[in-house]
Image (cartoon, helix red, strand yellow):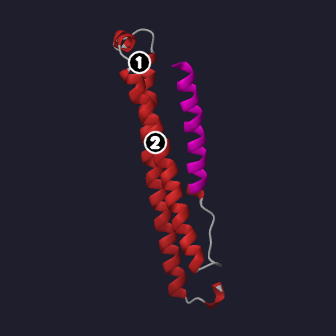
Amino acid sequence: MAEDLDHSTKLAFNRTWLAEERTLMAWIRTATSLITFGFAIYSFFAIPSGAGHELAKRHVGPQIFSLGLIVMGLIALLLADLQRRIAMRDMKAVYPDLSRFSYGEVIAILLGCLGLFGLIVVLIHM
């Protein structure tokens, strides 16, 4: 089937595939920012001495907020991967012989595992 396609169709497939890959990488950057910001807020209020320590003792707000950011980053990552998988399934239905390996998906999975591990650590320490 791939041999039957003309050059412009193959190039169009490659452009679409690369666009999906760029979109996934943009979502990975967003999820990384959310997860990192959540850890930073949690770490700031977990310091036993410092300006925010008394506030952290009286209020649970910053810890819950940081937990929410971490969870939101993981959900964004999951939805981005789901969106990409649906788009790739649709493309593979039209062009079954044209498929490529996605490094972005590998990065998304690794970041998701790292974020999930961090979320478990934060939940244990709360």
Vertical position of residue 70 compared to residue 64: above or below: below
**Where residue 45 sits: x, y (%)?**
41, 18
Q: Residue at x 38, y 11 (%)?
A: 53
> Disc 2, disc 1: CB below 8 Å?
no
Q: Secondary structure at mark 2?
A: helix
Horizontally, residue 97 falls left or right of residue 73, namely: right
Horizontally, residue 97 falls left or right of residue 21, namely: right
In which quadrant will I find the N terminus? bottom right
**Where residue 39 sits: x, y (%)?**
46, 29
Q: Residue at x 45, y 22 (%)?
A: 43
| Residue on which disc 1 sits | 45
Vertical position of residue 104 compared to residue 92: above or below: above
Amino acid type indicated by mark 1 = Phe
Q: Secondary structure at mark 1?
A: helix
| Residue on which disc 2 sits | 73
Mark toward the start of the polypeptide (2 vs 1) = 1
The answer to whether residue 124 is magenta is yes
Q: Residues within 10 Å of mark 1 (few under 14, many from 20)?
A: many
Compute the Cα span from label 2 to label 1.
20 Å
The answer to whether residue 95 is magenta is no
- Magenta stretch: give its range: 105-126
Horizontally, residue 113 falls left or right of residue 9, namely: right
Q: What secondary structure is the stretch in magenta mostly built from?
A: helix
Amino acid type indicated by mark 2 = Gly
